[in-house]
Image (spheres, rainbow, N blue to C red):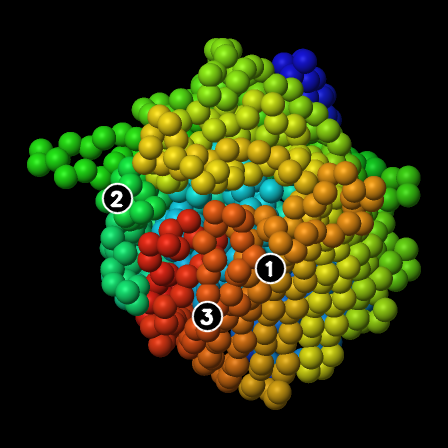
Amino acid sequence: MYQILTKIAIIITGILLVPVHLFGDNDGVTSASGTITGVVLDATDSQPILSAAILLEGTDRGITSHRDGDFIFRNVPAGRQIIRTQHIGYRVDFTAVDVAENDTAHVVIRLFPEAVRSRDVIVTDDYIRDDRTTGVERVLTGRSLRQQLGRTIAETLNDEPGLSQRSMGPAPARPVLRGLGGDRLLILEDGGRTGDLSATASDHALAIEPMTAEHIELLRGPSALIHGGNTMGGVINVIRGQIPLDWPDHFHASGSLQGESVNSGLAGGLRLYGPVTENFAFRMDGSIRSSQDISTPLGTLDNTGIETYNASIGLSYIRPWGIIGVSGNILDTSYGVPGGEGLAEAHPNGVNIEMFRRYTEFKSRFRMPGDFLSRLDVDATYSFYRHKEFERTRFSDGRRVIGSEFGVLTTNAKAHMHHNEWSAADKGLFGVWVEHRDYASGAFSETPATIERAFAAYTFQEKDIGDWNLQAALRFDMRQVSPLRERNSVLIGQIRERNFSGLSSSARALYYISSGLTLGTSFITSFRAPGIEELYSEGPHLANFSFEKGNPNLNAERGWGTEVFIKGRTNQFDYHLSFFRNQMNNYIFPRDEGRRATRRDDLNVFLFQEQQVLMAGFELDLRYRISNNWTLSGVLNYVRGDFIDDDSSFPFLSFGDSDVSVPMMPPLSGRFNAEWSGGNLRLGATTRFAAEQNRVDEFEQPTNGYVLFDIFAQYNIITGSVLHTFSLNAENLLDTEWRNHLSRIKEIYPEPGRNIRLLYRFYF
């Protein structure tokens, strides 16, 4: 069945490509296009702004402004276009422009400093709502990305509303959103699957280096469902732009250098982007990260160093009818997972992990003739991932013992057909996605070699009705999990082929009460098939401090989620308040059984099981502009996880038992910022805090609350055509002892102590 569906998807894609002449100008397409030229100016003094990020909404196309503030988009589809412009120290601007066939539209974009509140700049008579049609809930870019840039994507996002990080040392950290982690929070790289194993275990690192990220997006609701049926938590999309999707008219470069004191860490990166010929554009980047063991208020946390090497190169062929591009990426990293007596008797000295990934990506964007179809996207990725875990021993001859070894070959392909007005929708897309994974493990791991095949078909539709914006998505997923050798395991039962299928759906409604006040609600049903490790794990996983037992009889996980939110904006005050409730049947998780394994009496048994759970909470995000220079802001997050009664007559409306908690739930947490900005200088102070977490599972360690103090400074200067930015962060100034409740090693040592971090970047 899966092979047949894959062939059908390939045939459909081929048929869709027939109208597009790949090696000609395709007059039927180019006649409906035009050009946008413009200039980006400072609204206060009309001076040009260098290196502003300019994006065409609803597309993947983005460029930066030149020294004189100008920019150009060629081969833009005729009709209404929305331009999103953002830059360090300025408010994000949305500008509408009408593009006529075979004509050039010129626009002047004036950006207001962020401390000054002004209405959005508009070049037509219609008001442009900043959260309409994009599907992106949050974007971390520019100065915010530089201020928060950490060793990992999880650390970089840790201060965003609703987000926390699962960790097992600094390297293998992964984001958790509203208590949902693993593959319930899908992490993408330029819209594609990463091909790593970071979602399966706490000791597995994410194969994305944040140093060369251009910006990071958070998607929820119907737009998240495009990327996966298991996106109850949402989607984090790290945009690196490895394949150029627009032709630059001159050469661009940016570089970064970062150092920090808590681990004697150094990192550097370089990104180049420019034209090759009239129709070709290239992009290449590289980065290096090296750090020693982390310092904590209780001393040095041994075996927490990181060495990472990352490089990529991409090339695009750009014509009026569309874009074809390819890129290649290599990532090599080695890092340590700490040990400790009492927690990891099997390896008290810790485990060293070496992993590498070779990643190839193909992207294409084809403009379609006619009024109904607007664009066809065909993307594919191939990933070769390998991961080795070495026990740290005291052998005098330097021998290393491999505890576990994993290898995964992953191929993904998807096709999206975007359309204009159809039936009741103003616009939308239809898509298909296929995946093939070849999984193997070795050394002490007994998880069987397995082939996974997956297929999905989905649609996303959007409609504006007066002051309402409506979005809906529907997705059907099929997954086949096939061990290469079926057998009966005395430990876990019958290892056999499993097949899963299910529907997921989502709807979102926004009501614009006024230009500064929006009410919204969303609903999602999710489908998640159990993973290979959850089904078939059988043996010790030393770096994860566990003896893992899978369950071949697990059912698919299904969830129902609802959210209600209000967003407001006035001349001085911005706020966003959300209440959410997510319920999952057959929630799959590894639970500590509180006993040692018979075959490894130095490791606790963790059994994958399924139960019905409820997670509910709220997020509050506030910003208050006291004056043109002073701004106060704050974030407050809370989520509660409960096991609930499977026999409840109304399970969706029931609430949990207060005496029982889902394991590894983040406590009430938040931050408070005070910021001063003037000219090219920005100064601020931050207080981070978390409450104690005493609602824990039976064998889970509770944690105390904490309060941390940080300060930061940013300075920008332009010399010639080069923009220089300096970011200085002093974190945990009082060297306070604190423990992250989502850390698997919180019983051994606390989190990092006082840290001074400096980041320098240049752009031209």
Q: Give the quarter of the image for residue 323.
A: top right
Mark yes or no: residue 517 visible. Answer: yes
What residue is shown at x 73% (from left), y 48% (from top)? Answer: 561
Which quarter of the rendering shows the C terminus?
bottom left
**Inter-mark Cα distance, 2 to 1:** 34 Å
Residue mark closest to the camera, 2 vs 1: 2
Q: Amino acid at mark 3?
A: Tyr
Residue 89 lies in quadrant: bottom right
Q: Nearer the viewer, residue 12 or 335?
A: 335
Q: Nearer the viewer, residue 757 or 643?
A: 643
Proximity of marks 3 and 1: CB atoms separated by less than 8 Å: no
Q: Which residue is mark 1?
A: 162
Where's the N terminus, which quadrant? top right
Q: Earlier in the sequence, mark 3 or mark 1?
A: 1
- Is residue 396 rendered to the left or right of residue 725? left
Tell me, yes or no, whether the two marked residues, 3 and 2, touch with CB atoms within 8 Å: no
Badge 3 marks a residue whose secondary structure is strand
Q: Reading the chain from its start, which is encountered first: label 2 or label 1?
A: 1
Instruction: Tell me the residue at 62%/62% (across/down).
Output: 638
The residue singled out by tag 3 in the image is 706
